[in-house]
Amino acid sequence: MIAVILETPYQGEVALHLRYMRACIRDCLLHDEAPFAWPHLYAAPGVLRHEYIEERGLGVQAKYTWRQFAEYTVFYSDLGWSDEMVRSRNSCTRDGWTYQVRFLNDGWLSAQLEREASGEALVDWLRSLGG
């Protein structure tokens, strides 16, 4: 497996963006990549407060530290580009750091929204708990 840094939107519709990030983590794994999904880790409750720019900056600095272990950065952009994703892509370009832009292209977003509207996502979650 190849270590990669994973970039997806986080701000805004956080719940949707976290579900999307998990789908992108899965996609990376299926590409034989070991993704470092930094917002999943650093913006988790009790870690850093993403709404405070100083604390968000700590997460961004930590992400750049991971470059010494990763081969490249993967940007998933089905949901568009956040300001941080644009800054990160600009940094990749400026620093000569390799990156890829991907789309899930599997109907993930429309399927996810349909499942939520039908209540199917809740049923799946309950089943995962053994109910």
Image: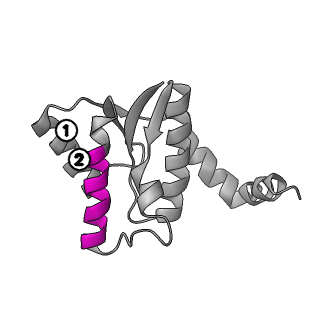
Q: Residues within 10 Å of mark 1 (few under 14, many from 20)?
A: some
Residue 57 percent across, percent down from the top left: 25, 63
Residue 48 percent across, percent down from the top left: 39, 69
Q: Camera-side residue: 12 or 95? A: 95
Q: Is residue 38 left or right of residue 110?
A: left
Residue shown at 26%/47% (left/top)? 64
Q: Are marks 1 and 2 in contact (CB under 8 Å)?
A: yes
Q: Is residue 30 above or below residue 130?
A: above
Please give the residue where the numbered disc 2 appears in the rendered image. 88
Q: Is residue 89 above or below residue 15?
A: above
Which secondary structure lies at badge 1?
helix
Q: Quadrant of residue 130?
A: bottom right
Q: Is residue 56 visible?
A: yes
Q: Is residue 82 visible?
A: no
Please give the residue where the numbered disc 1 appears in the rendered image. 92
Residue shown at 31%/31% (left/top)? 72
Residue shown at 55%/53% (left/top)? 19
Q: Is residue 21 above or below residue 100?
A: below
Which residues fall within the magenta stretch? 54-65
- Going by the numbered disc 2, the residue's amino acid type is Ser
Most frequent secondary structure within the magenta stretch: helix
Whether residue 7 is in magenta: the answer is no
